Image (cartoon, helix red, strand yellow):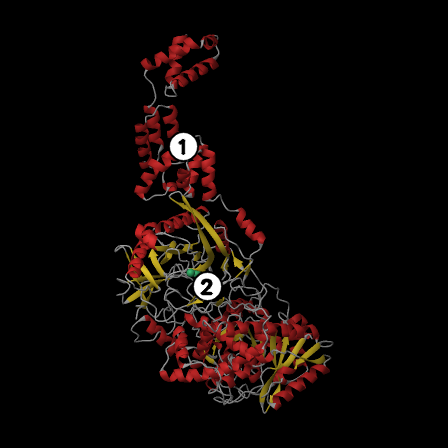
Amino acid sequence: MSAIATKYEVVVGLEVHAQVLTQSKMFCGCSTDYLTAPPNANTCPVCLGLPGSLPVINRRAVEATIRTALALNCEIPEFSKFDRKNYFYPDLPKGYQISQYDLPFSRRGHLDFDVRGAPCRCGITRVHLEEDTGKLLHEGAIHEAQSSLVNFNRSGVPLMEIVSEPDLRSADEAREYVMRLRAILQYIGVNNGDMESGQLRCDANVSLRPAGSSELGTKVEVKNMNSFRAIHRAIEYEVVRQTEVLDSGGRLTQETRGWNDARGLTVSQRTKEFAEDYRYFPEPDLPPLDVSRHWVEEIRAGLPELPAARRERFVAAYGLTPYDASLLTSTRPMAEFFEETVRLGGPAKASANWILGDFSRLLNADHKEIQESSIKPTHLQQLLHLVETGGLSGKMAKQTFDAMYHAPDPAPALAEAKGSSQISGDAELAGLVDQVIAENAKSVADFKAGKEQALKFLIGQAMKLSRGRANPQRLDALLREKIV
Amino acid sequence: MKLFHRTIRDLHQMLRDREISSVELTQSVLDQIQAVGDRTKAYLLVTKELALRQAHAADERLRSKRDVRPLTGIPIALKDVLCVKEVASTAGSKILKGFTPPYSATVVERLEAEGAVFLGKTNCDEFAMGSSNENSGYWPVHNPWGLDRVPGGSSGGSAAAVASGEAIAALGSDTGGSIRQPAALTGIVGLKPTYGRVSRYGLIAFASSLDQIGPMTRDVVDSALLLQAIAGHDPRDSTSSPKPVPDYLATLGDGVKGMRLGVPKEYFVAGMEPAVEQSIRDAIRLLEQQGASIEEVSLPHSDVALPAYYIIAPAEASSNLARYDGVRYGYQAEGARNLIEEYMLTRQQGFGAEVKRRIMLGTYALSSGYYDAYYLQAQKVRTLIIDDFKRAFTKVDALLGATSPTVAFPLGAKTQDPVAMYLNDIITIPANLGNVCAISVPCGLADGLPVGLQVIAPGFREDLALRIAFAFEAATEFHKAQSPLMGAAA
Amino acid sequence: MPEPTSELSSREVEHVARLARLGITPDEVLKYRDQLRNILHHIEALNRADTSKVPATAHPLEERNVMREDRREPCLPADAALRNAPSREDSYFKVKAIQE
Ligand SMILES: [Mg+2]
Ligand SMILES: [Zn+2]
C-alpha cells in the first residue's frame, strides 16, 4: 500500500443517504415504520403514485435537513425548492423522484474529524432532501431473477442526501468521515445510524491521480456498502484494482460498481446503454420555500452540543485524554452516560475507563448500544464508590460488573458486592470500637449523659476508619455495649 | 318542459318544495341518456345504480329538511379525469382501462357532501389533451348541435352531456381551454377558475401548473352555484389557495354599469370566422348598452402564449404520465421478455398518438441541451403573459373576446394536422398561463352553431367574471337556445 | 404551411422515445419526426420574445412554505393498494426481470 500511496493520490468523495426520523412520510401521512409492516400496508394514493394524488411537504423533514446542514457548518440559502428527477424504475412509483436540484436547502459546509490523531477536514457540497423509493425483492440472484417483487412501504420516506467534496484521501479517512457523520446525525436526532437495514447508506466515488496532479481521474462509483468495514474494504479494493489497471497501461471506465461483501470485491454493474438524462424541472405540485433567517435561527437554537464541542469540553472539564474524549463522544448516549455517571459522583477518569473498557467490550460482543443495557449511570457510580471507599478489589469489581451486565436488574449484584465487602464480624469490629472510644472521650461522655446524637458521631468515625466497610448496625450495638 | 331541461336553480326550488323527487329527476336524466346517448357518446360510463342510490339518499335529506344544499339531489356528470372511489376512472385513456381508484377527488367529496347525484364519467380527450374529443382512447363525442361536428375538447363529453339534457350540469377540467372551448362549441356556460381556486387533488394530471377543475352548466347562475360548492382551500393540494371564497350569488346581479371592459386587439386572430367575429362584436356592443365602457387594450405577448403552452404543458405531462408503466395499475402489454420491453410496449399500446406526441415533445423540451432554449424560455414567456394581464387590469376591470375563433368543426377535419388543432386554443390558453379566471357564455349562433363570448377577469375574481357574464345573459336569450337533441322546451 | 426548419433527426426521435419509454416503430419514427419538426417550427416563435431580463415562472401562485405537520394518517385499507395491479404475488406487486 505504501508504494501505491506515493505513486498515485487517492481521491474519494462520499454520498450519504440518511433516512430522516419522522413519524410520517415525506409527502403523505403514511407511517415510516416500513421494516415491520406487512408488504404494501404502509401505502396511500400519494406514495403509490396513483393518478390524481398530490404531495404535501412534511415540515419536520425540512427542519431536520436544515438542522443537519447547520451541524455540518453549511450555508442555508433563503430560497429553496423541490424538483422532479425523472427516470423509470419499478421501485419509483411516479416515474420521477421528488428531490432538489439547483436550489437545495443547504450547501458549502464541512466536517472535521481525525484519523489516528491527525486532524482532517472534508468539504460538504450540499445537503438536500428527497423521497426514498420502494424496495425490490429478487427471487434468487439479481441478474438471474426472472421477476422481482415490489414493496412500496419505504416509498416516500424522507431521505437526506449528504454529498461531500472529493476531499478524502484514503479508505481510513473515508471510514472516519462516515463514522463522524453518523455520530452527528444521531446526536442531533435526525437519523438512527443503522447501516445494516439501510437507514444510512453510503456510495463512494473513487478515483486515482498521479501524485501532485490536481486534475481528477476517471471516477468509479461504488455502491452497496452497508457497514463501516465494507466502506473501508471496498475503497481499499478499488484503489488496488485501479492502480493495477493504470500500472498495466490500461484505462479506467467511468462506471458504477457494486461491492460484494462476501467475495470482498467490486463488480461492474452493467454499463448503461445511453447516458442518463434526468430532465430535472421544478416540481409544479409544490410551491417553493422561503427559508427565513428567523426560522434558521430557531432551528439552530434547538441543536444539542455537537460531538466536537463536547469532546473539547470533556478534555477541559474532566481532564480526559483527547483520545478517550473522542471515543466517549462518538455516540450521544455514551457521552450522556458518562456525564450522568460523573454528575452522580463517579470519578471522571475511572468512569471513562469503565465505559470504554469493560462496558464497551461487553456491549460490542453483544452488538448492543449503551442505552440498551440494563446498567444505568447510577449502577456504575455505585460500583465505583464501592471500589473507592468500600475496599472492593479490582477483581471483585470486574466480576460484579459482569454480573450486573448480564442480569436483567443490576441491583442484586451490586448489593451482594456491597455485602461481601462489609465488615460484620464482632472480632474485627472490636478493635475499631476500642480505637474510637479512646480517641473521642468527649463524645463518649456526651453519650453517657444521654445525647443520642453523640453515638451517631462515633459510628461515623468508625465507618471512616473502616473506609465505609463496617456494618453500621453492628457498630451501633457494640458501641452501646462497651460504653454503658 | 321535461325535468332534464331545467337548471340547477329551478330544480333546487322544485326539490325543496317537494314538487319533485331527486329520484324522479335522476330518472328523467337517465332516460334522456338512454334516448340520445348513442348519438352523442358523451359518457364513457353511466353509473345508474350509484345515481339512484344517491338520489334516494338526497330525497331522504330533502324530506327531513336536514342540511339541504343547492346541489342536493341534482344529477351531475363528472369528466373522466376525476377520481371517484371504486368507480372506473380512465382519463379517456386505454392505459387506465378498468382502473378503479381507492379514493375520490376532493371536488367529488365536496359534491357528495352537498348531496349531488353522480350520473357517470364523461368522455374526454385522452388525459385531457385535445380540442375536439377525437383523441379519446375510446370513441369520439358528437356535438348535440350537429352530430357530424366535434363538441370541442377536451371536456367534450361533459359539454355534450349538458347541451343534450344528459346532465343538468357537469364538471370539466381546463388546462388550455378545455372547459371554455367545448362550452362555446355546444352553447353552454363554462368557467375556468383561477389556478389554486379549486383543489386538484384527485384530478388525473395533465399539466400540473395549469390544470383547473370548473363547472359546465346551462346558465351563469348554475355556474356560480357549482363553483361555490367546489371552490376553496384543500390541505391535500399544496397549490390550492387559502384565500376565502366569496358568495358568488350575492354579487351576481350587480350589473356592469360603470365597469371598464377591455377588448384585447390581439384576440381577433387571423382565421377567426367572420360570423364568430360578428357575434362577439355584437356581444361587446350589448354590454356597452348595459352601461359598461369599452376600450381596446393590448396583450402584446399573446402571440407567444401558444408556443409557451406547447412547451410547458407537454413538459409537465411527460413527467406526470411516466407513472403509467403497467406495474401498479392499468394496462400491461403482453409478451414482453423483460421489464424495459414491457414498459415500452405498455406505453406504445396504451397511449394514443396525441399523448405520445406530447410526451415526446415534453421529454425533448426538458432533455439536456434543450432545457434553457425551450422550457426555461417558455417559463419566462409565461412571466411576460402574467405581466400583460396585470398591466391590462390596471386599466380595465375585465377583458372580452371570443372563446374559440371558429364554431364547431366537422369530425375529422383537423385530425391530420396537429398544429391546426392546436390553433383552436389560441385565445383560451393565455388565461391558463396568465393566472387569471375566464368564463365562456353563449352569445349567439353562427350558421346554426353556438358561439361563445369569453370574459376574462383577474385572478380570484370569479365573482367579477360571473357578474359580467350574468349581465350579458340576463339581457339576451342566447342561453335558452337548445340543441336539437335536447328538444324544444315543452 | 411553412417549411419545417427544426433539425430534429430520426436519431433524436428514437432517443426521446427511449427516454420516455415509448415503443416506436420505424414508420412512426419518421411520422413523429415530421410532426414534431412542424410543431417545433411553430414553437420557435418563443424566441421572438425578449426575455433577457425576465424571471421564469414555475409556480403561478405566490404561496410559499406550504407544509403539513408530521402526523400519521391512516393508510389505504388492506389490499386496496394491490387491487388494480396487473401482476401480483401475495401482497407484492410483481414485475419482470429488469435486465434486458
Ligand atoms: Mg439522491
Ligand atoms: Zn402514503
Quadrant of res A406: top left
Secondary element at tag 1:
helix
Q: What residue type is disc 1 on?
A: Lys
Residue A23, placed above or below residue A423: below
Residue under numbered circle 1: A349
In this view, the residue in front, B383 or B76, is: B383
CA distance separating discs 1 and 2: 50 Å
Q: Is residue C52 above or below residue A459?
A: below
Report x, y in % for residue B13.
Answer: 61, 74
Residue A98 numbered tag: 2
Please name the residue shown 45% across and 84% down the image.
C35
Residue in the image at 46% along x and 47% along y: A188
Report whether residue C63 is seen.
Answer: yes
Mark 2 burial class by Cα count in 10 Å: few <14, some 14-19, many 20+ = many
Farthest residue, direction bottom: B447
Q: Position of residue B61 (x, y in %)?
A: 54, 67
Question: Residue B120 at what x, y percent from top left?
Answer: 47, 76
